[in-house]
Amino acid sequence: MDQLEKVIIRMSNVSKRYGKMDALSGLTLDVHENEFVFVTGPSGAGKSTMIKLLYLGETATEGEILVDGINLARITRRQIPQLRRKIGVIFQDFKLIPTRTVYQNVALVLEAAGLRPKEMHPLVMSALEWVGIGDRVDEFPPVLSGGEKQRVAVARAMVGNPKIVLADEPTGSLDPDSAARIFMLLQIAHRAGATVVIATHDQQMISSHGGRVVRLEKGCMTPQNQGGRPSC
Amino acid sequence: MLMFAVRRALADMASHKFLHTVSIVTIALSVFIVSAFALFFNNATDFLDAWRKGVRVIAYVGGPVKDDQRAFLSETIAKLEGVASVKFISREDAFNDLKEKIGDQSSLLDGLDKNPLPDAYEITLTDAYRELTDIEKLVKKVAALPGVEDVEYAQKWLLRFNGMYNLFKATGMVLASVFFIATLLIIANTIRLIMYSRREEIEIARIIGADEKFIKYPLFIEAVVQGGIGGVTGILMLCLAFAAFVPNFAPETGFAFFEMRFIPMRFGIAIVLCSMLIGWVGCYLSIRKFLTY
């Protein structure tokens, strides 16, 4: 790894506790700009918690997290939406709004960023066509298949041209063909310049790509990590 | 941002029709009841004023009045505070007047040996001097004058009406406060239910970078629109009830001197603005508890 590349995510000795349970313990990790990182490990290893900490779905109990230079421990309420607009998030359960059309689900990101409908339209259509669902813009999520829903979610994550894409088990509930297609879209996003962090236990996906892998077990980084130090 | 918020608020209202309809109907009923009390006070105040204008104080003089005494009493009473005019009514005039009033049965009076009626002074009050306490002060002064044996005024009725008016006023204020709080809670609860039903959407909006204004503005607009529609509906309901019942009221009760009026336009506008404000406050209370980043 070229040390001159900018560190876009820095986690220093980060811990997250839920009551008496440690979800993450002393995690230290740097992710560079335009890097493609897999975070893997068994269920309960802390992968989802780590992703949540990065988009401030949760706050760390201890340690310091910097995302694109912003210290998440010192972020103000007003800065949170600005940080989140730099990040596209993809979930295993898609998190689409069932009462809004495919178009409206994707457009929500741009509406929240304050764009006008005229400005939004070409961007939304381009994102939906990119994921291959441009002909179903007026459909509602409940009528789509799992793979289609996830493509809409990818379009929503990418439409705002984010610096960072976080994906939490993005292929976890998809058939192999749909999973391959989603993974391909994430690779394209990476090639377009985004930093991609994927939490997954899909070993086939990891081996087919060969990117950097961070392994977690019981909230700790394991010694065989490439680039990370063991945390416990 | 505002146009977008308005569009979203209207779309949300359309998609949560039942919830909003129940809320608007409840607000309308609350506004109807509060406005009905306001209508009553307004008219009760007018009625009392109109009636007080007709109130006269009658001072009866014991025994026949000599000319010099009559002039003295007239002048003295006329100089008292609150007196607009004084008219002397001799016992003969009063007797003749009585005869005229009882008409065919005036022959009953023929059997009397002498005129039983006393000489009297009819005192008309100034417009500014019609409160019960003022009238009582004047009555005391008149009763203390030499030769005056008794003073009469519509004391019993004034006391009763004043008491009733004050009772209604207190009840109305309590009810208005209760309905104010009820409306506030209803709107707060509706907004909370809407937020609860949309919690996933709100959560997603946050994750994708929506700021607080983006989430809050449509909810505030919904609450204010709810308050506004509820307020206007309540006033319209009162207007219909007024138009249906009031024309049949006055002739039967014989209050010809008094005409009932609807609440003034500015008061109606104030009620609607107040319901909109309640909507805003209700939404604020809900959001404060629900939305935390």
Image (cartoon, coloured by chain):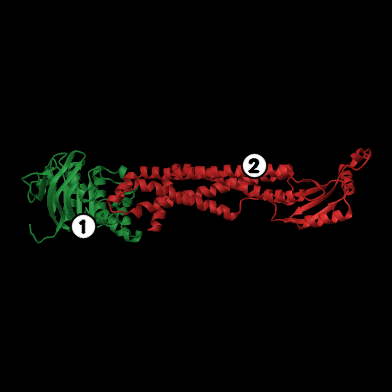
Residue B83's place in the image compared with A205, above or below, is: below
B72 or A188, nearer to the observer: B72
With A137 as the anchor, is B32 left or right in this view? Answer: right
Where does the image place residue A181, in percent across and percent down from the top left? 19, 48
Say yes or no: labels 2 and 1 on the same chain.
no
* Circle number at residue A176: none
Quarter holding residue B72: bottom right
Pick the residue in front: A144 or A100: A100
For label 1, the residue is A70
Q: Is residue B108 left or right of residue A135?
A: right
Disc 2 designates what residue? B164
**Residue shown at 58% from the left, 43% from the top:** B170
Q: Is residue B189 visible?
A: yes
Nearer the observer: mark 2 or 1; the answer is: 2
Q: CA distance from mark 2 to mark 1?
A: 69 Å
Q: Residue furthest left?
A: A224
Decide which of B174, B82 is in the foreground and name it: B82
Q: Which chain letter matches label 2?
A: B
Residue drawn where x is 41% and y is 45% of the image: B191
- At x 64%, y 42%, the residue is B164
Left-right relation of A159 to A198: right
Q: x, y percentage for residue A88? A: 23, 53
Q: Chain A appears in which tint?
A: green
